Amino acid sequence: MTEGEGAERLVAGRYRLLRRLGVGGMGRVWLAHDQKLECDVALKELALPIGISEEELSARITRARVEARHAARLRSHPHVATVHDVFEDNDLPWIVMEFVPGARDLAEVVRSHGPLPCAATARIGAAVLDALMAGHRAGILHRDVKPANILLAEEPATEAHYRGELGQVLLADYGISLQPDSGEPRLTATSGIVGTPGFLAPERARGAPPSPASDLFSLGATLYYAVEGNGPFDRPTPYGTLTALLFEEPPPPVRAGDLGPVLAGLLAKDPDQRMGSDEAMRKLAELADMPRAAPRMREPAAETTQLQRHKPSTLRSPPGAPPAEEGQAAADGATPPSYPWRAKLRSARVLGGIAVVLVLVAGGVWAGAVLLNGPNDKTAETGKALPYGNDVELTRELKPGDCVHASWPEGRFKDLPKLKIVDCNSNPDGQVLDTNASTSLGEAKSNGQGICIGLLRDTTRKMVDVQSFALVPSGAGWDSGVRNTACLLFGKTVSLYGPVGDHRKHGEQIFVENSSIGDCYNTRKLEEHNYAHILVDCTTPHELQGVGYVKAPQGMKFGSWDAIYDLCVKRYGSYKNPSRDLYGWVHAEQTWNQDFRFVMCLLAMPKPGQKLPPGSSVPT
């Protein structure tokens, strides 16, 4: 087809095609004039292979329609290329998108001008991540982040641009790239995978469902391309690229500078070890060394990003005194990251699903519980449907911050628990940390599990022996207006002993079970050799700070303080020096005997009465 072929054609009696802008993953993209609104738009025309079956045709059209509507929900985000409408012409869907004059995609820019500097790449990464996080909070996954889907409204051709002063950055093709074209090799639905091999997350190539973590891997590969000038797994053929993606580590970047650790974190092949969105956003913003992009002239975004100070969380035992009832502990294999800032998106409400799914994640096993309860659901005395069905027995919708007691008829996490909402200071079994919203049950079933994993990932990484759990409304609950999937965190072995994460308050007593890496504490003596650990602000002088956890060997007895101390020194000895010491903290003998054998390792000053200076002592 020539550049002008099809131009001046009128589509849907409204859009006059002016010229072809290019060929995308789903078909041709046209510059068109909307004769009704008197403005230029970009139209994406679905292209389908010859000989496609009616079933496959119907499936692709349905997906294009649904996902275009998903993308339209992000129309007010400053870094998302707006989808205005979706319509059908000659039984095929067309997608009406924002036209940005002069915009070029990142792949073309790198081909024309070479690799970008670190600051400019970080600036692009922060903008795209901002868009992805907003989508994830709304239950929308991109699934095809790559350089060709990032639009730059201004060419970074000047020296100012290369210093990082880029123009508008837009993420395009939000989940609507369906069909391969001759110009770009892709894996498609014929192989059960949709995505571009060099930028696809390894777990997706193995057939795992999409998740927020898979979008983050694709972002990491995209930023690697931007700063290095080539993809991390580039090979001569698509399947050579796929093999490298699955079995080889990317070559160490040579131009990335301080961006290198971020790329390494995002490109971790194990999604449980991959850098989370909050940490990546903080690091990218620091590397960009500039304020976030000014909002575009639109309505305010429904999901915006706020930066808020992270509350310190972790209890500790006083220097020189072996903790008894509330001891000293540390977590197995945990890296002690510092989280001074967290990007927290405003809560978006979510809905239900259908099946019990267990997926391994960073803080433990993720249990996604989705009910398929029909019109025979019991109702509460008020006449309203039980929001999560008969088995759960709750009569009201769960909200972030709610704490629950749980009983598991078939064994812990093997089925749906019976839940009772309780005071968070009454040794709860679990707590609702967030909720997730979708527009349909189908969307919740597809994306809800991965969304909850992403929402709770940072919390589970900093705790020990905890497990995420997604509780979806029942069918009757959905029909009655409950549209939120509750993302809960449970203790895997014992109860949480109190609220967790940002739901804790300074001045509260904390236990090993609800402590977090990076928490700062003062102590309060309860009785001889027994101290309470009080959560305090790390920006003030403090007695203790948690650096991580260690799992005690099976044969070790409770109260073996010297052995517990040795465990911490063996794992975190780099923190022990003339001006700092290490301590171990365990909880009660009762929980120890229930196989909660975790020691939290704590950093403290070596002399009694001394306090650690303000600020985190745990490096990133």
Image: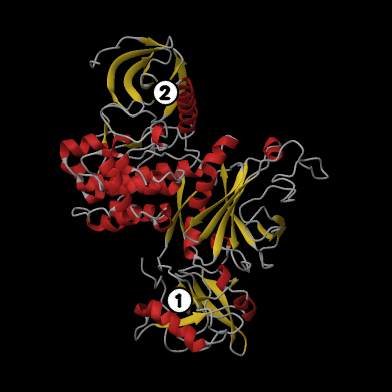
Question: What residue is pinned by disc 1?
Answer: 541
User: Label 2 neighbourhood size at 10 Å, few (<14), some (14-19), many (20+)?
Assistant: many
Residue 88 x %, y %: 46, 17
Q: How many marks?
A: 2
Left or right for 540, reference 531:
left
Q: Position of residue 43 (x, y in %)?
A: 37, 21
The amino acid type found where label 1 is placed reads: Pro
Mark number for residue 306?
Answer: none
Does any portion of residue 231 appear in the rendered image? yes
- Residues at marks 1 and 2, CA–CA distance in whole angstroms: 57 Å
Q: Are marks 1 and 2 in contact (CB under 8 Å)?
A: no
Residue 126 seen anywhere in this rendered image of the structure = no
Instruction: Out of 183 and 309, give the one closest to the viewer.
Output: 183
Q: Is residue 46 above or below residue 453?
A: above
Closest to the observer: 544 or 380?
380
Q: Is residue 512 left or right of residue 142?
A: right
* Amino acid on which disc 2 is placed: Ile
Looking at the image, residue 235 sits to the left or right of residue 460; the answer is: left
**Disc with the residue nearer the chain's start (1 vs 2):** 2
Q: Give the structural element (helix, strand or loop) at label 1.
A: loop
**Quadrant location of the N terminus in the rendered image:** top left
Residue matched to label 2: 95
